[in-house]
Amino acid sequence: VNPLDPVRLARAYLSRVAEPPAAALSALVAAAGPVKAAELVRSGEVPSSVASQTAARRDEDRAEDDLRRIAELGGRLVIPEDDEWPRWPFTALASASRQGLRCGVEPLALWVRGAAKLSHLTERAVAVVGSRAATGYGQHVAAEFGHGLASAGVVVVSGAAYGIDGSAHRGALAAGGRTVAVLACGVDVAYPGGHEALLARIPEQGLLVSEYPPSITPARHRFLTRNRLIAALAAGTVVVEAGHRSGAKNTAATTAALGRVLMAVPGPVTSASSVGCHELLRSGEAIAVSSVAEVVESTGRIGEDLVEPGRRSRSAVGPPGGEAMRVHEALAPQSGRSPEVISVESGVPLSRVRALLPEFELAGLAERVESGWKRSHLSDGRGDA
Amino acid sequence: VNPLDPVRLARAYLSRVAEPPAAALSALVAAAGPVKAAELVRSGEVPSSVASQTAARRDEDRAEDDLRRIAELGGRLVIPEDDEWPRWPFTALASASRQGLRCGVEPLALWVRGAAKLSHLTERAVAVVGSRAATGYGQHVAAEFGHGLASAGVVVVSGAAYGIDGSAHRGALAAGGRTVAVLACGVDVAYPGGHEALLARIPEQGLLVSEYPPSITPARHRFLTRNRLIAALAAGTVVVEAGHRSGAKNTAATTAALGRVLMAVPGPVTSASSVGCHELLRSGEAIAVSSVAEVVESTGRIGEDLVEPGRRSRSAVGPPGGEAMRVHEALAPQSGRSPEVISVESGVPLSRVRALLPEFELAGLAERVESGWKRSHLSDGRGDA
């Protein structure tokens, strides 16, 4: 791969020119292609919606410098045209986008550090997030979960913050496992300062990932923007501890909006640091998880655990009586049904139904229609894919 | 009230002659009336199903002695013919009975100690139960909940066991509130031994209640039988701490079977004493509660909070957009709907729907039909009741 090919240069430029998420710019790139889109942005010949996102920085073309800088760091710019682009995980963003959700904007490119392929690490990943102001209990649980998930071959995704995030990454590293930190700043920025050593270690066993080009510093809105990527790159998100106004609740909301499995760890009701988790449990938004085994159970992937490759017929949807089978049987072949109705029909919790349907879609077992979801009829050719 | 009237004597006799729950004997009493049923049992002229329940003890007629004994203790035998019989709470047992559930057997009579009227104390009651092997955390939460509920005017129902039960009773007593202990032995038996002083204090501010006549000692099966009364006498049950095999899980299952609100308190996932609570949360059987306010919110009663007395028309079902209103609007006037469908239609959690429907039934707002529940058409006369 030539790091200075025109498409990569164009995306590197676009990655800096607008503050993500920039839906209008993304639409232009989708329509015109990245090279042409970059030309149009540079020249200012763009619709006003794109102009307002790009006018301030359109003369700031640091693409070559940025690509040189990331290479010096042993990193690279991963773009949608690359094999390692996390295409499947990001279909959740596209779905959210069709629903008009702000979190539904796919990044234009991702700056990464570490040898592993991003698409490989997101095949079986779970996010573990929570408060920076974590208690000893929360840090203990986060480290145990990070360690246990990594030992089970699950990649631990988090945000490298103090508290829960850091403990989850450290647990995964201690297990010799893999972990992905998605940052709200450039992958060359040591933030938070106290995590400089941790941030240096993660690329040895996993990846640092950011939507922001090198040298970009963190800002409040960037944490919120970053959170959607944590939610999207993982099959589910575990909130270990969250106060009433914790940023982790934003990741939780995005996880639910993206149709991913949302999990929360119970804690003492006397602890302010567990209030956010208990709110998520009480409202029914999150499933309670008390162990790594329960996290794995709640986030089991169709592709790996339930559908035999090459035999994606109805009878191949997991074990008889299993959740996936029951959800698939609750789909009607002719007309769409809402996830709520499918949940009642199948007796499978709504949050699991919401997680399974997009997986069915990817596996060709279901499709989204106006009125909800219906069962797919696979062509023979696709059945062998 | 003459303590030695024939009906009371008959029920005192019947209360000792069969081991509860004795469905066949209850059916005989319902059909023949208590006096005639007692005569038939004494003479042995009963169907074989009743004979097998009563043959062993039918000659043991200690009714007068038992009534004298309970009077000496400052107590009384409460029977269905009395005004203070908890008629409304026990409709849940009748519903369970129609579904063929073993927990659905109404007691033949209740032995009580304490000045308060039983029907009065069960108007607004919540059960707080949990492990005998409670942690300091669990006992703290149970005492706080007992204190807070009692302070809010809610009667605290529990089983007087060591651990959670004892803490809940003590919390209620410390608040100067009212509490009901439902025992698995006679109300003159000091069990458990270490709770002798607590058992002596409870009748001063509330009631000791038992289905078992004086001097009956506790047995394993009696705890399970007793648990259905705890569940039935309260609008909902809070499980504070429960191990994987705790008896509190039996009360929880009965609470759900009786259509009462089941709540569980989260705790540290590192604590074996919270495993049962977390199982109930994970499965969706219980609602998470972290505070007294949440318990009150989850168990708010139609009669008091939602329906204006004397105006029980459809428009009077609580505030517009409130849970009760939404559930009532989800009922069809012509055909029955299942609680699951009503839950989806109304957007109100299934456990709340299950709690509201029997309250609607009592308020004349809904009725149970073959296929589920339908909306009732109130006669004008009933609307003024």
Image: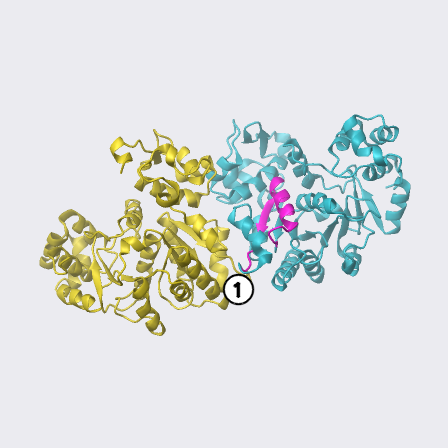
Chain colours: A cyan, B yellow
Q: Residues within 10 Å of mark 1 (few under 14, many from 20)?
A: some
Q: Quadrant of residue B166?
A: bottom left
Image quadrant holding the C terminus of chain A, namely: top right
Q: Nearer the viewer, residue B292 or A356?
A: B292
Residue A286 at x, y = what percent? Answer: 56, 48
Q: Quadrant of residue B374?
A: top left
Q: Nearer the viewer, residue A117 or A250?
A: A250
Q: Quadrant of residue B72?
A: bottom left
**Seen in the image, is A154 located left or right of residue B206?**
right
Residue A178 at x, y = what percent? Answer: 71, 55
Note whether residue B221 is visible.
no
Q: Chain of mark 1?
A: B
Q: Nearer the viewer, residue B97 or B382?
A: B382
Instruction: Determine the secondary structure under disc 1.
Output: loop
Vertical relation: A371 (above or below) A265: above
Residue with the mark numbered 1 = B271
Instruction: Count numbered badges in the picture.
Output: 1
Residue at the farthest bottom position: B194
Residue A306 at x, y = what percent? Answer: 57, 44
Residue B246 at x, y = what percent? Answer: 42, 62
Instruction: Based on the picture, tell me whether residue A255 belongs to the magenta stretch.
Output: yes
Note whether residue A114 is visible.
yes
Vertical relation: B320 (above or below) B159: above
**Seen in the image, is B318 located left or right of residue A24?**
left
Instruction: Based on the picture, tell me whether residue A75 belongs to the magenta stretch.
Output: no
Image quadrant holding the N terminus of chain A, namely: top right
Q: Residue at x 13, y 55 (%)?
A: B7
Vertical relation: A385 (above or below) A46: below
> What span is colored magenta in the figure?
A242-268
Give, as a three-letter code, the residue at label 1: Ser
